[in-house]
Amino acid sequence: MTTIKQILEQKGYAVESVGPEDMVLDALRLMDEADIGAVMVMSGEAIEGIFTERQYARKVFLVGRASPTTPVGDVMEPNVICVASDQTVKACMALMTEKRIRHLPVVDDGRLVGLVSIGDLMKSMIDEHQFNIDQLVQYVRG
């Protein structure tokens, strides 16, 4: 079974973040520059929340708030669901499906060490299935 640690070893451990006092527009620019769908909201090493495209759509755009003057802390998701790096991809996919989320911060020993998306997990599962298919084809060919 593939673990989140294995995904992070391939993808990298870098996590983009903003502070709760930063404006939504700054978070959106960072997300655009990094081509990502979420940023962590941090106060030093402490996780304050997560800000995603979904929070922007629902809590900023649809209610007519202004991105340049709305602090991320006012619209972030403060109840962040996290996983440890030893969790399996399968367990994380089940969690993301159940909780209807697309991003999982990875926390080991109380410290943020990475962030995985549903796309990262899907890629891993597809790669694993392709490996199994290739192995079966080789076996059948003898």
Image: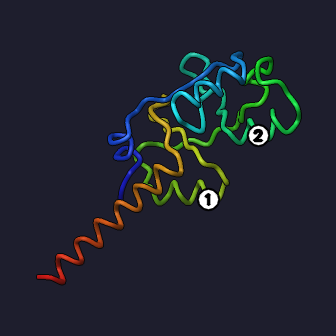
Q: Is residue 14 left or right of residue 78?
A: left
**Secondary structure under badge 2?**
helix
Q: Bin the neighbour count of mark 2 within 10 Å (Cα to Cα): few under 14, some 14-19, many 20 and up.
A: few
* Image position of 66 with respect to 102: above or below: above
Q: Residue at x 42, y 43 (%)?
A: 85
Estimate how packed mark 1 is, as few (under 14), some (14 to 19) or many (20 or more) residues with alpha carbons within 10 Å. Answer: few
Q: Secondary structure at mark 1?
A: helix
Residue at label 2? 57
Q: Which mark is residue 97?
A: 1
Q: Nearer the viewer, residue 59 or 49?
A: 59
Q: Are marks 2 and 1 in contact (CB under 8 Å)?
A: no
Question: Mark 2 or 1 closer to N-term?
Answer: 2
Q: Residue at x 38, y 51 (%)?
A: 3
Q: Position of residue 1 (x, y in %)?
A: 35, 60
Amino acid type, label 1: Thr
Residue 58 in the image: x percent, y percent? 80, 41
Identify whether 140 is placed above or below 131: below
Q: From the top left corner, tell me how far across and down residue 33 is, in percent.
A: 54, 27
- Disc 2 residue type? Ala
